[in-house]
């Protein structure tokens, strides 16, 4: 049961960060059909229903399981890009992902994610006419669409800028240091 609730919280985490009061609705929408397999959930579901009836603010209250349930292939959603995500790179040796999307105007937004809890560790904007490309090394990220910015993975500090005359369509590295 603990593992199931952990998955429910991970699936709900991006919503809970923006509105912690949606926990009851998230629990109801993700677990109502599971109470047959997990009778221990019944008291939790009753508590969630009771709480939403006492709250005076308007909210959506699921009457059936209408959200993605735990136990499937989706483990969590990462919310933090204003536009469509163009590229995601996973770090092979630790639970870190780097994602990039077009920002506004001539920029791209890059987010560094801790995949254990779904936290955004760093978020930064780089200048780019088109959506930037990314690659990840041992302790750094390289981001570029024209120039290449090399950024420290843990601190988010810019370490180096590499000038380039043409648009970058692919970015890769064969070394562990920038």
Image: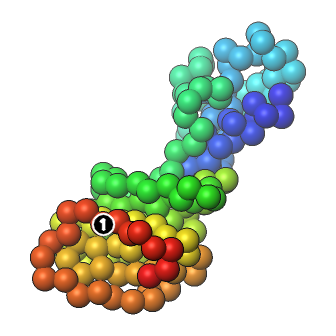
- Whether residue 99 can be seen here: yes
Quarter of image, res 12: top right
Q: According to the image, label 1 marks what residue?
A: 171
- The residue that appears at 44% across and 82% down in the rendered structure is 178
Q: Could you tell whether 134 is left or right of 46 in the image?
A: left
Q: Where does the image place residue 95, in percent across and percent down from the top left?
A: 62, 56
- The residue that appears at 73% across and 27% down in the rendered structure is 49
Q: Where does the image place residue 118, in percent across and percent down from the top left?
A: 60, 54
**Image: 76 above or below 52:** below
Is residue 165 or residue 97 the one in the foreground?
165
**Image: 30 above or below 167:** above
Is residue 41 or residue 100 the one in the foreground?
100
Q: Secondary structure at mark 1?
A: loop
Quarter of image, res 161: bottom left
Question: Where does the N terminus fall, quadrant-wise?
Answer: top right
Q: Where does the image place residue 104, in percent across and percent down from the top left?
A: 24, 68
- The residue that appears at 44% across and 86% down in the rendered structure is 158
- Whether residue 123 can be seen here: no
Q: Where does the image place residue 93, in percent across and percent down from the top left?
A: 62, 58
Q: Could you tell whether 56 is left or right of 73 in the image?
A: right
Q: Residue furthest front?
A: 174
Number of marks: 1
**Image: 98 above or below 8:** below
Q: Residue furthest left?
A: 166
| Label 1 crowd (10 A; few <14 / some 14-19 / many >=20) | some
- The residue that appears at 55% across and 34% down in the rendered structure is 74
Q: Residue furthest top?
A: 36
Q: How is the image coloured?
A: rainbow
Quarter of image, res 38: top right
Is residue 107 or residue 148 the one in the foreground?
148
């Amino acid at each position: 049961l603990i593992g199931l609730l952990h998955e429910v919280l991970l699936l709900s985490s991006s919503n809970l960060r923006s509105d912690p009061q949606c926990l009851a609705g998230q629990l109801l929408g993700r677990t109502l059909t599971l109470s047959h397999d997990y009778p221990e959930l019944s008291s939790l579901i009753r508590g969630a229903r009771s709480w939403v009836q006492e709250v005076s603010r308007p909210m959506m209250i699921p009457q059936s399981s209408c959200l993605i349930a735990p136990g499937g292939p989706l483990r969590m959603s990462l919310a933090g890009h204003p536009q469509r995500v163009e590229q995601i790179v996973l770090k092979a040796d630790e639970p870190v992902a780097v994602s990039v999307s077009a920002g506004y105007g001539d920029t791209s937004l890059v987010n560094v994610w801790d995949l254990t809890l779904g936290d955004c560790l760093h978020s930064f904007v780089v200048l780019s006419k088109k959506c930037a490309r990314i690659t990840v090394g041992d302790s750094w990220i390289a981001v570029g669409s024209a120039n290449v910015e090399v950024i420290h993975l843990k601190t988010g500090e810019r370490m180096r800028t590499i000038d380039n005359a043409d648009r970058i369509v692919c970015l890769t590295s064969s070394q562990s240091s920038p």
